[in-house]
């Protein structure tokens, strides 16, 4: 199964600071992940992380990548399932720059 997202930065209409890709406590096995910069003229800045209960002030957050720049017309692929072997209590999240547009494909 694949999940598809159009992630928009907070300054873009309908965008937000953090987008949940896979919810905590949802049994999943991410096999691969593709992040594609779809903006016409601006490089995208991406942070990908796992986190347990995001509504709790004492959450545990672990970054997979932090502030990685994806140039215009480029993509970043993760094809090592071991990266995403995490406890079921953790969800998968992405943050992008305020004006960024990223398409995300999650293969489970």
Image: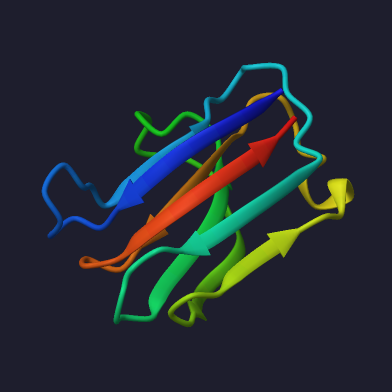
The quadrant the C terminus occupies is top right
Q: Position of residue 95 (x, y in %)?
A: 39, 57
Rendered view: 27 above or below 78: above
Residue at figure coordinates x 25%, y 58% from the top left: 9
Using residue 108 as the reference point, say whether residue 69 is left or right of it.
left
Residue at figure coordinates x 53%, y 71% from the top left: 66
Using residue 59 as the reference point, say whether residue 85 is left or right of it.
right
Residue at figure coordinates x 61%, y 18% from the top left: 25
Residue at figure coordinates x 52%, y 61% from the top left: 36
The quadrant the N terminus occupies is top right
Q: Is residue 31 visible?
A: yes
Q: Position of residue 20 (x, y in %)?
A: 44, 36
Question: Splitting the image into 4 quarters, where does residue 31 fall?
Answer: top right
Q: Position of residue 97 (x, y in %)?
A: 30, 68
Q: Position of residue 3 (x, y in %)?
A: 58, 30
In this picture the colour scheme is rainbow
Counting every numbered tag in the picture gives 0
Rendered view: 12 above or below 39: above
- Nearest the viewer among 47 and 59 is 47
Question: Splitting the image into 4 quarters, where does residue 41 fall?
Answer: bottom left
- Nearest the viewer among 85 and 6 is 6
Question: Splitting the image into 4 quarters, where does residue 75 fall?
Answer: bottom right
Rendered view: 96 above or below 44: above
Q: Is residue 61 visible?
A: no
């Amino acid at each position: 199964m694949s999940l598809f997202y159009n992630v928009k930065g907070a300054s873009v209409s309908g965008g937000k600071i953090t987008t949940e890709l896979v919810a905590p406590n949802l049994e999943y096995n991410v096999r691969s992940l593709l992040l594609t910069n779809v903006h016409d003229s601006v490089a995208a800045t991406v942070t990908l992380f796992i986190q347990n209960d995001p509504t709790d002030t004492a959450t545990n957050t672990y970054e997979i990548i932090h502030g990685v720049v994806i140039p215009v017309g480029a993509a970043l692929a993760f094809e090592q399932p071991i990266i995403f072997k995490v406890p079921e209590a953790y969800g998968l999240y992405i943050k992008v720059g305020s004006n960024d547009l990223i398409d995300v494909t999650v293969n489970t």
